[in-house]
Structures are given as structure tokens and as C-alpha cells.
Amino acid sequence: MPIDIQVIDLKEMEYRQAFAIQEEIVRGCDERIYPDTIIFQQNHPVITLGRSSDWQNLLKSEEELRTLGIDVVLVDRGGDITYHGPGQLVISVLIHIRDHSLGVHQYLRNLEQAVINTLHFYGVKGERLQGKSGVWVNNEKIAATGIGVTHGITRHGIAINIEPNLTHFSYIIPCGISEYGVTSLEKLGINDRNVETIKKRFLEEFNKIFNTAVVAPVWKEGDY
């Protein structure tokens, strides 16, 4: 039987606020008040550093970045440094990983596969690179992963580059990998980049891979 999952769409908001909402929902999931949850969001420009980040991969000072309108935030996820901003679809996935009989490694591969399948609808061949996380197209990253697991509940997730400002990625060494670039659907020449359609496609693929079924949201915006 499929596992219930609610979908929350935060549209575009400041990263710190979106993260606070994610944490509130994680607590509700831990108490079984909320079902498994997918959160869609786009963020105001922000650079986030995970637990294993090397500050040398931040190529501008925090003061310079804030002058450019880019925030810098430390987060409790795996992975190194990454950028989020308008035109990038951030997908946070909060699931009870044991309910899905998954380990962390397989969970990540499944999450990547949902994006690979989504890209297929646009004629884009996404793939994995040996020893690297995320989804790649022609050796350039189009989707970055970074997760945390607390009390068996996943947090954070994957971000798909639809049409972000790719110049902002030049202010960092994305994920600490200097030898590969970053791409987007826009850079690949995909004209049909409707975000709502991409969300729908991703949900369809996610539900098939994770055996989930979307239910009416239990969490409401007024809960926060």
C-alpha cells in the first residue's frame, strides 16, 4: 500500500524562513502529527555550507556577498557548499526512511533517479558520475543533493537548476568540486521550463519510485 505524503509549496521566500518551516514540519513528522512531506521552494539568493564544507570553497567574503544581495548560511546537512536562488527548484524531502525500507545511500540514489526521470521528459539525459552525488548532464551538475537524517527522518533534499543566475555559482566552488561546471535547463536550450509542470513531473516520478501517494496537506501555513 502506498505511503501517504503531503506536498507543501512555499513558492519563493528567504532561506532562513523556509528552513524554520522545514524544521517545524520535521518535528511534526517525528511526532507522527504530519505524514511524510515534500516541500517545494525557491529561495532568495543564498549560499549554504554543510557540515563538511571547506570555507576555502567560498571565493568571496561574506561582506562582498551580502553587498551583492546573497546571504550566507550554515546548515546541518551533508555535503559541501552550494548556491540557491530564484530559478532553482529546491525540493526538501521529509520521510521516515525506515518506513520505506531504505538506507541513506539507496535513498539518495532514488532521489537522484526521480530527477533523472523528470529530466527525461525534456529530452535531457541526466546521469550520475562515479563517486559524485547529484545529477549531471555532460559532466556539468544540473541537480545538487544534500541531506540530513534525524530520528530516522530525512531533511533537505535536492535542487534542480531550471533558470538560475549561473554567475552566482562562480562565487563558490560548488560542492567543493572545481573540475566540473554547473548547468541548467535554460543553458541546455530547453524552452519549456514551466516550474509548475516540473513539480508535477517530479511528483509523478517520486511517487512511482518511493511508492507514495499525495494526500491533502495536514500542515497549514498558519501552523508556522
Image: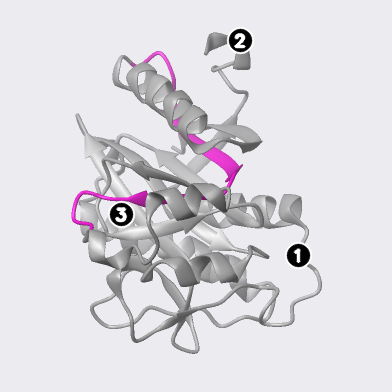
Cα separation between marks 1 and 3? 27 Å
Image depth: mark 1 or mark 3 in front: 1
Pick whichever, 223 or 81, lies toward us.
81
For the residues bearing labels 1 and 3, Cβ distance under 8 angstroms: no
Q: Residue furthest right?
A: 191
In primary-sequence order, the first of circles 1 and 3 is 3
Where residue 114 sits in the image (x, y, percent)? 49, 61
Q: Amino acid at mark 1?
A: Arg
* Residue drawn at point x = 37 percent, y = 42 percent: 73
For label 2, count other residues whose C-alpha is less than 10 Å away and answer few (under 14), some (14-19) or many (20+): few
> Which percent across, then down, holds residue 210?
42, 49
Q: Which mark is residue 193?
A: 1
Residue that badge 3 annotates: 107
Check if residue 62 falls in the magenta segment.
Answer: no
Q: Secondary structure at mark 1?
A: loop
- Counting labels gives 3
What residue type is disc 2 on? Answer: Gly
Q: Secondary structure at mark 3?
A: helix
Callout 2: SS: helix
**Circle 2/circle 3 CB separation < 8 Å:** no
Residue 222: which numbered mark, if any? 2
In the displayed structure, 95 sits above or below 209; it is: above
Residue at the limit of the structure toward the top, as seen here = 222
C-alpha separation, residue under disc 1 versus residue under disc 2: 31 Å
Q: Earlier in the sequence, mark 2 or mark 3?
A: 3
Pinpoint residue 111: horizontal percent, then vertical percent: 41, 57
Between the C-alphas of marks 2 and 3, the distance is: 31 Å
Q: Which residues are magenta?
A: 32-53
Residue name at image x 50 percent, y 47 percent: 66
Task: Kindly indicate the quadrant of the structure image that contains residue 110.
Answer: bottom left
